[in-house]
Image (cartoon, helix red, strand yellow):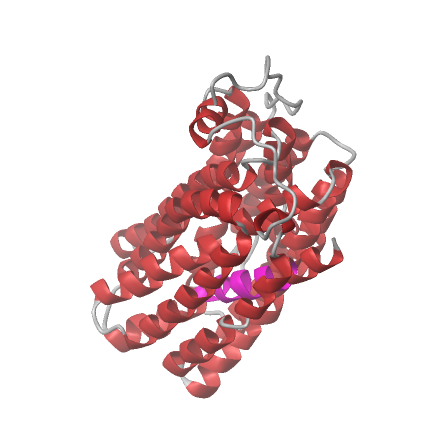
Amino acid sequence: MTQILLCGAIILMLSMGVRHGFGLWLQPVTQSRGWGRETFAFAIAIQNLAWGVAGIFAGMVADRLGAFKVIVGGAVVYALGLFGMASATTPLLFAASAGILIGIAQAGTTYTVIYGVIGRNISADKRSWAMGVAAAAGSFGQFLMVPTEGFLISSFGWQQALITLGLASMMMVPLAWGLREPAFIGGAVIQRDQTIMQAVLEAFRYPSFQLLMAGYFVCGFQVVFIGVHMPSYLRDKGLSPQVASYALALIGLFNVFGTYACGVLGQRMQKKNILAFIYITRSIAISLFLLVPLSPMSVYVFSSVMGLLWLSTVPATNATVAQIFGVAHLSMLSGFVFFSHQMGSFMGVWLGGYLYDRTGNYDTVWYIAIALGVLAALVNLPVKEASIQRKTAVQGA
C-alpha cells in the first residue's frame, strides 16, 4: 500500500502540478504570438475535452492491462505536448499540442488511472482516505509547481520554461514501475462479473451515477475557469503578476488540507453531504470575493478558501462510484464521470475567453459559476451511496 500511495502521489504531483500553472502562460503566449485570449482559452478547452474523452479509454485499458503501460505512454505524450506548445506558431498547432496531446497525456497520468490502482489494491475501509492522500499530493504539486513555473517563465522565457517542464514530465516513467499490479503480471486474477458494456449500461441507468456526473460538470466549470483566467483577471484589475502566482500557489497549498480532510471525512460521513457542502460553499466564496474591494489580501483569502474546496470533490466522488459499483471497472466508470467534469472544464475556460473578448470583462462567467454551484449542491443531495444490488452474477457474460 505504501508503494502504491507514494508512487501514485508523486505522479499526480507532477502531472497535476504542471497543468495547474497553464494560466501563467496565457498572456506571454498571446502577446508573443499576437493572438486573442480566446485562442489560448480554446486550446485549453480542447485540452480538457480531450482529457475527458481519452480518460474513458485510458480507464478501460488500465482496468484490463494495468496502469503501468498507460502511465508510461501518458508521460511520453505529456513531454511531446509541452515541446509542441513551445514551438507552435499557429493557433491550430497550439491547439493540437496544448489541447489534444496534453489532454491525452493527462488522461493517462492523473486520477482516473491512479484511483483505479488504489481502488483495486486498498481495502474499502481505507479507500476514501487513500484517495484523499493521493488528491492531496496532486494539490501539493500545484503549490510546488506553480511558483516554479512562474520562476521559469520570468528567468528563461515562456518557451524554455515549457521545454524544461517537458523534460521533467519524463520522471513519471520510472515512477510508474511502482504501480505495477500482480493481477497484470502473472499473479492473482481480478474477478469480473460484468463485461465492459454491461458495467456501462448499469451505471448510466442508475440515477445516482447521473447526479454525480452533473455535479462533477460544475466542479470542472468552476475550477478550470478560475485556474486559467484568474491570473489575467487580477492583472486586468491592476494587481501584479506575483499576486496571481501566489494566489494559485495558495489554492494548491490549502487544497492539500481540503482533499485530505475530505478523504478522511468520507470514511465517516455520507459523501453526498460533503459534496453538497463543497459546492454551496464555493458559490458563497465567489460571491463574497466579487462583493468585497479587490486587494492582494482579499485575493489571498479567497484563494485559501477555494483551495480547501478545490479538488476535495475528487476523493468523495470517486469513492462514491467505487462504493456503489465496486472496483472491477472503477477506472472506466471514473473516466465517464470525469468526462462530465471535463465538459464543464471546456465550457468554463472557453466561455471565459469568449465572453471576455466580447464584453471586456469576466463578470458574466463569475455569475454563471455561482449559479452552477448552487445547482450542484442540490443535485448531490439525492445520491444513494449504498452498493448496488445485483440479482446474480451477470448471466451469459
User: 152 or 292: nearer the eye?
Assistant: 152
203 lies left or right of 6: left
Q: Is residue 144 above or below residue 157?
A: above
> Is residue 365 visible to us here?
no
Q: Is residue 272 above or below residue 150?
A: above
Residue at point 57% right, 28% down? 380
Q: Is residue 283 above or below residue 45?
A: above
First to last magenta residue range: 9-22
42 lies left or right of 153: left
User: 119 or 393: nearer the eye?
Assistant: 393
256 lies left or right of 331: right
> Is residue 13 visible to us here?
yes
Residue 322 horizontal/vertical position (percent): 62, 34
Residue at point 30% right, 55% down? 42
Count of picture labels: 0
Residue 159, image quadrant: bottom left
Residue 385 horizontal/vertical position (percent): 65, 25
